[in-house]
Amino acid sequence: MNSTVLDRTPDPGVIGFWRTAQGVTLVTTAALIVALFIVPETALTVLWDVAIPLLPAVFLVDPGLWRNICPLATINMLPNRWGARRVLDDRLVPAAGVIGIVLLALMVPARRFVFNTDGTGLAVTIMLVAALAFVLGAVFDKKAGFCSSICPVLAVERLYGQSPLLDARNPRCAPCTMCITRGCLDIAQSKSIVQILGRARRSHAWLQSGYGVFAAGFPGFVIGYNLTHDGALGTAGSVYLTVAAWTAGGYLTSQLLVRGLNLSAALAMRLLAALAIGLYYWFVAGVVTDHLALPGPAPTVIRTVAFALVALWLWRADWSLAAHGRDASPRLP
């Protein structure tokens, strides 16, 4: 195990709070899985129309708020008490991130023909992913095997967590053992993307990197998903084709704008994040209102609050860029 240790340990009382929150989230997830088998319609509504729509906003405020209580992270770290584990080699970090992005690209469209309507299928998938997180936690140190490498949500957490409005200390990895050598979102959110892109961020070469392709295509991915509809398993091909086409179109449009306007990687990443989350809440506001039978003004209220949060985030991001420099090359503290 890497001998380097970083200590950003929160106060004992803060750690106790987060430990309690982790237990509550883990029990809630177990209850959700049971509900997906017993009362799938109710469980699916609570998950897709209440819980999931809140997460992007939480990531903007501080991805650490979710990462501190994520039930998969809790499961991933359970085997750590058994002893020393492998760190994730520096050369494998980008590849692991690409695996997570591929999983995201496969699982999100699958909502349309499985997960949005099939409670049993979703419950089984959650349990399989939890089992994978546990096994990888037994092989790699701390979060290196899953949460900070191949987690499908990690790429989104990085994109939206570039300039968090808060700074929640990480109670899981205290002290930090540097289980991954670069790009750790739990050490410093603002440095994660910079370290993943490496030297490529100094030119437009970042657009050809694994994470660069994800970020540039993600707004199109959001549009593509929301232009598809729930259907039978036989619609899988058309769903993936639609999402892929919009993602490719979004990527090409981002390429043209970034190169044509000569945008830096730092500025482009902020703008892509703001566009993606703005598009997400534009679509989800109508869906949530319909599914939950909310009053007529609800979509406007949801969109207004979401756009205000994005504007605040962008304002904060501009200050962050001014403070650290657009071509800064921060390292792990």
Image: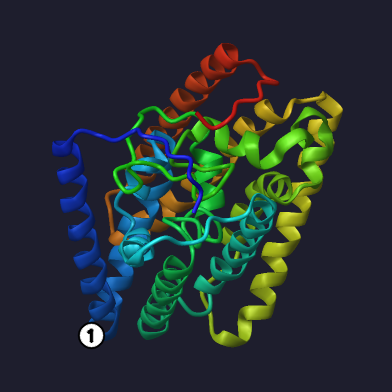
143 w.r.t. 126: above or below = above
325 or 47: nearer the viewer: 325
The furthest residue to the top: 323
Question: Position of 237 compared to 226: left or right?
Answer: right
Image height of 304 relative to 29, above or below: above
Q: Using the image as rendered, state which of residue 214 and residue 304 is in the foreground.
A: 214
Please report the residue visible at 43 percent of the width from the left and 39 percent of the height from the top: 5
Q: From the viewer's perspective, is 127 left or right of 207?
A: left
Q: Circle 1 is placed at which residue position?
A: 38
Let me know if residue 192 appears in the view: yes
Residue type indicated by callout 1: Ile
Would residue 272 be found to the left or right of residue 5 on screen? right
- Residue 219 in the image, given as x and y percentages of width and height: 64, 47
Q: Which of 61 and 41 is in front in this view?
A: 61
Residue at image coords 86%, 28%? 260
* Residue sitting at the far front: 3
Q: Which residue is drawn at 48% across and 20% down?
A: 316
Give the colour scheme of this rendering: rainbow
Dot 1: what SS? Answer: helix
Residue 297 in view of the camera: no
- Residue at image point 61% right, 38% down: 193
**Image coords of residue 66 (percent x, y):** 35, 48
Residue 312 appears at what percent x and percent y?
Answer: 44, 23
* The quadrant where residue 234 appears: bottom right
Vertically, is 225 above or below 174? Answer: below
